[in-house]
Amino acid sequence: MKLKRFVSIMLAVLLLTAMLPVSASAAVKLPKGYQALAENERFIVGVNTSNCFFCVADKAVGEVFESNPSNWKTDKKATGSNKTRLQSQMVITVLRSATENTETVNSQLGSVSKGAVKLQKVDDGLRVLYTFPDFGITVPLYVTIAEDCFRVYVPADEIEETTADKLLDVEIAPLLGAAGTNDEGYILIPDGSGALIRINNGKTKAGAYKAQVYGSDKTFAATVDNNTMLRAALPVLGMDCGDYGLMAVATQGDAHAYVNAAVAGVTNSYNTMSFSFSVRAKGEYTIGEENYNARTVNLYQQDKSTSGRYEVSYYPLPEGACDWLAMADAYGEMLLGDRTAEVENRVSLRFEGMIYKDKPFLGIPVSTAIALTPYASAVEMLQQMKDAGVPVVAEYLNWNNNAARNRMGGVKASGTLGGQKAMTALLETAKQVGAPVYFTTNALSFSSENALIARFTDAATKLSSFPVELHTFAISTHKEDDTIAPDYVLKADRVADKAAELLTAYDKLGAKVSLGDAANLLYSDYTSKNGSRSALKAAVTELLDGAGTTLMSWPNAYALPYAAYVNDVPMMSSDLSLTDETVPFYARMLQGRVGFSGAAVNLADEPRAAFLHALETGADLAFTVAAENTDELRFSDDSELYAIRFGDWKETIIAMYAELAAARAQLGGLVSREAAGEIVTLCYDNGAVLVVNYDTAAAQTAYGPVEGLSYLIVPGEEAAQ
Amino acid sequence: MKRIIAFLLALLCLCPAAIAAETPYTGYYYDSWGEIAECPNIYTPEAEFFPVDMALATPLSSPSDLFIDEANGLIYIADTGNSRIVVLDAQMQFVREMTGYTENGEALTFRNPEGVTLDSQGNLVVADTANAQVVRITPEGELLNRYTQPASALYPQDILFQPEKVACDLEDNVYALVPSVYQGVILFDKAGEFLNFYGGNKVSITPALLFDYYWKKLLSQEQAEKMARYVPINYLSMDMAEDGYMYVTLFSETSKKQIRKLNPLGNDILRVEVEKKAEYGDLDILYHNGTRTDTQLADIAVSTDDFIYALDSNRGRVFVYSQGSDSLGVFGGSGRQTGLFSSACAIDTLGDSVYVLDGVRGSVTCFAPTTYGASVLSAMRLYQQGEYAASESIWRELLQRNYHLELAYDGIGKALLAEGKYQESLDYFKQANDVYWYSKAFQSYRVEAVREVIGPVLIGVAVLVVLYMVWSKVIRKKGPKKERPQTPVRMALDTILHPIAGFEEIRYRKKYSAGFAIGILAAWFFLEVIAHQYTAFIFNGHKPDSINVLLILASTAALFFVLVFVNNALATFMDGESTLKQLWISCAYALMPMILLRAIGIALSYALCSEEGVFLIVLTVVAWGWTFWNIVCALQTMQQYTFPKTLANILLTVVGLVIVLFIGFLFFSLLQQVGSFIRTVFDELMLWQ
């Protein structure tokens, strides 16, 4: 065995040396043992033929990024497979066909140590072919260099499976860029608004971070969902080590990606960040009633989730511009190019149009439409805002009978809300006062009221061939709420048709469209054999492309380029025990590029804190409002709208807007942001300093006392003194 | 110098967690209907303190208790796994640790202590669990008293005295909880003498208990053991409040009365205005994958303002209650985020702040009230002190944040009531679904209203009486009395007051009106619907807009016809002479008194307050008695039975109904089985690839 391994490695070395000897650049040298394979203006990629470690040297940043820590041997924390993991460039999870068990094995243990690895030089880098003889699976890993980044990827169509064992997951470069116990800095994770995990923070019992990019897949939702973590809407990870930074972006196969991050001290002594990809989905189905003759069957996707690549691009960042702010700027530019926001500082109003509620008619419960904001009231509100000098961007939710029930069908004006005439008046007012009003209709989910036929013709299905259901979950038990009928979601290949119908109807109406869940809902669809999240992502991207720029709610990365305005931008992370600081990465990425707002101030736990977040991040203030019948919301499915009476909030809207505008006028472009507990200090390029106190109690700061839930602005000239 | 550096280091370690977190849980409370009502969060997590943040050299290992000394701002943690007591300051910074105590100069160590508290002198009282004792020691670690397994015959000697929780009252008596000692809390005097069991109660005999008792006699021993065993009481935790009352939580199969406030005699004196409110914790039970997760209130803390904080270890939630058992809010949950727990095991308060210990993560999370929560607490504080007027403005402000907040409507209602604005207060009490106070306000309002209208009403009545007398004496006498035609409807109406004669007449003349009988049944049905919807608020008790018409139909007309058919079937055995048509029509006639009085009852409900509800009960009894009598008459007449035979017939009809329902149930469950079978076959087909 040992001999075999030795021979194969020797062969590989011979092959490589024969093929291309490239001289390393003078500025940064590849570490000892590495052999250069390709070089461009900025990067050199090298490989260590003795252990298959690879590295990329960045001449611009002056740093070498190794696939594995060179001093892995000295790690006393890691033992067994954790030790071999330190030497791995890939970790795979395989379904054993014989036992239906899943096995996770790293490339060192499963392939390299068995001598079943081949190294090859390709045009701009390296191809490593890992064969896992125990499973008969071969997975190639490419490392290539480009102009501003280097890429590590696995092309799906080059994965070979010679036995009945199937590849389920692949984690790419689990230790690339890993920071050791002596390093300082943080890992940026895309959890909600974004959060930082300080390197070596010692929270070894807090668990690792793992989240599905673009939100957990509802196709695989369990009946009890205890996951209260926020969505990871961006396929980004970052590491700031002080004198350099590394940003990792899942650039292909991102719909199947998971983000992982861990601190040192759990299974090894390294702080790591990595992407893993689901190659095949695994589901289960319970036959028979729960607790009664129940039998659970495991189901697996037959084909691979994509025919493209599972690709991670790494962007090294130089000292001085390697913090999360720089990453947000770099990533924002990647997604949105050089777009600039047209209007700064508005108020985002969300009108709640109407609800349906069972009301007794002659004692018999009938689903009855109840108007919350008739079109005429919306006109009035827009005008009142105009009179008060508050510019508005508005989203009209549940604005017609179908939208209120999430039913597919026409987009006619609702009689309950005043009919077509009133609707026309509203559209005119909107133009007159210069407030764009977007009318929201969900493009993907639809009510089960439509389901008689649509369930079979239009609904996406699970691996079990049953339709995917979006359930409401009970607050106290986190179990599916049986009293509320679930929604269905569209099949990938029906998305385009339905959207075309919708857009035509909107055109006819002359109303601006917002496609609701199209921007933030991603799921798998197994109607056809090769259905997957990426198929749906492609369909949605095409749909958004056709719709032009629209208003969106907290869109996933792929939808963001089509955003005209973004609502519900998260200002907070899930606040995992593992993380040390929440940062407004998402907001920072949008700032100056697209107008955006956070969650509704009036429904926030702490409205004043929502104001402070807006001030700090450059977000607009958002309010969810309704004009009448708010008492009817009690005992309805929308009882969480407990404070949306416009009359109660009008004065607050006007006052908060004025306060925000005045405060913001004193601030320039953000230079730095420091958080210490509940106190955040922001410095601006005009010299101004903003100190925000999120605590309810007053605090003493370096710039003077700040009231609880308040802020302090030190204008440019004073701060300089 | 070293000290300064240590201090600076400690400062650096302060405030570990992130900024004003967007809370990982949804705020809610349980409303007067026992249902979840969403609301802004009343508490949000400030920070989660890990051992690193506490400047602890050794991390906590399976800590199990947390006690806060409010006077000195010190926090005591029973670090069970490390056999020590850790003392932290109010900023959660390490002060000192105690691994044992000295007795006559000899150093002894704790073994897995699970509970810690302080006595009135500031001495530590530690449940030294694995050493099977409770010890009272000075802050310096000198042993004062030792409390060990009572030798008393009252104590079940087969159970080792391993105390898990301790408490201390104002007289420094020591209370110890030992699991599986069901007699109550073990009470020692200060010196260490066993006094008695505190708060133990006897099993109260309920019909359900008796049923189970006899049922178990029929079962095999194995089966009987599977059934829940009746144990007198099983306390989970306790907290001695500043006012000298002991608050306890119970292990319980239901949410009912899981929290108790015990007076020195050990009786529960927690005030509950409405029976519904005597349920604590989450009221929804989760059945999943064959296991049941229920609220289990593992610890309890009472703040200086007498708010009750109960910790559900199963779901990691904290429930906040007022002294009146109003649910003020719920926060926390299980998960890996700050504010959620892996295994929440102990809770205590410091002012309005709440500290929760996580036994698995070995961390302490500090929660502070939001501005909304602070308003709720301060309004409730005033309200509890009876200062309704002062609380009114706060309640009104809170309505802007949450117009569904029942407590606010209740508070404003009471303020208005105190000001004498009765009519206005009625609306608020209705919004608050507070029948008790609505009735009180209504009583006052009624006096006022009657006073206003009594004059005109009396005059009106007098005028009517005079007019009637004139009409009957002058006008009516003039004409000859006309013979009224005997229509079927008139004959039916006659049965109301003269059932025997009336039904004989009908049977004799064979004048039945099926239409009228249908009308009666329809009236009954609609009247029940109306009663459901329009009975006055005080006597209604139904949630607005919640009505199940089918259920009403089933309990009126459908039930009626089933009974008639059963009776008709019985007639075959019992030589009844009625035809089915005669039978159902006459029985429908017999319902008239009940329907008439029901209508009167609904109207009357608008004039009565709660205490006068007995009138409505009397009315109902009269109505059913009357109807029952008319039914007896109808059956007797139509079937030609003797009176005893009629009664037997009715009894047998009821038995017949039970049999019919049983068969119906069997049929229904058979259908379900078939349905489930078809579903399984369908599933298999769908999965067949």
Image (cartoon, coloured by chain):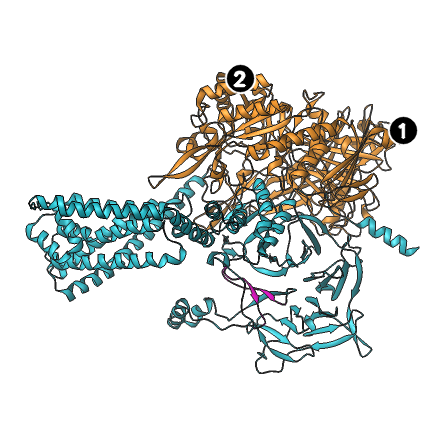
Marker count (numbered): 2
Q: Which mark is residue A428?
A: 2
Query: Which shade of the palette goes to chain A?
Result: orange
In the image, residue A8 lies at what x, y percent?
75, 38
Chain bearing tag 1 is A
Instruction: Identify the residue shown where x is 10% and y is 60%.
Output: B640
Closest to the observer: A672 or A175? A672
Q: Is residue A135 above or below residue B286?
A: above
B396 left or right, relative to B131: left
B535 or B90, nearer to the observer: B535
Check residue A697 in the rendering and tell me which mark sits there, or answer none: none
Q: Which residues are magenta?
A: B244-265
Chain corresponding to cyan in the figure: B
Say what amino acid the circle numbered 2 marks.
Answer: Glu
- Image check: A347 left or right of B596? right
Who's the residue at 56% across and 20% down the image?
A547
A472 within the magenta span = no
Query: Which of the two residues, A483 or A255, is positioned nearer the viewer here?
Result: A483
Label 1 to label 2, Cα distance in Å? 64 Å
Whichever of labels 1 and 2 marks the residue nearer the N terminus, that label is 1
Select label 1 or label 2 by which is in front: 2
The residue that mark 1 highlights is A27
User: Counting other residues with Cα less than 10 Å from the Cα at mark 1, is it few (<14), some (14-19), or many (20 or more)?
Assistant: few
Callout 2: residue from which chain?
A
Q: Indicate the quadrant where residue B623 lies.
A: bottom left
Question: What's the residue type where badge 1 is placed?
Answer: Ala
Give the residue displayed 83% in from the left and 23% down from the top: A41
Residue B400 % position (x, y): 57, 40
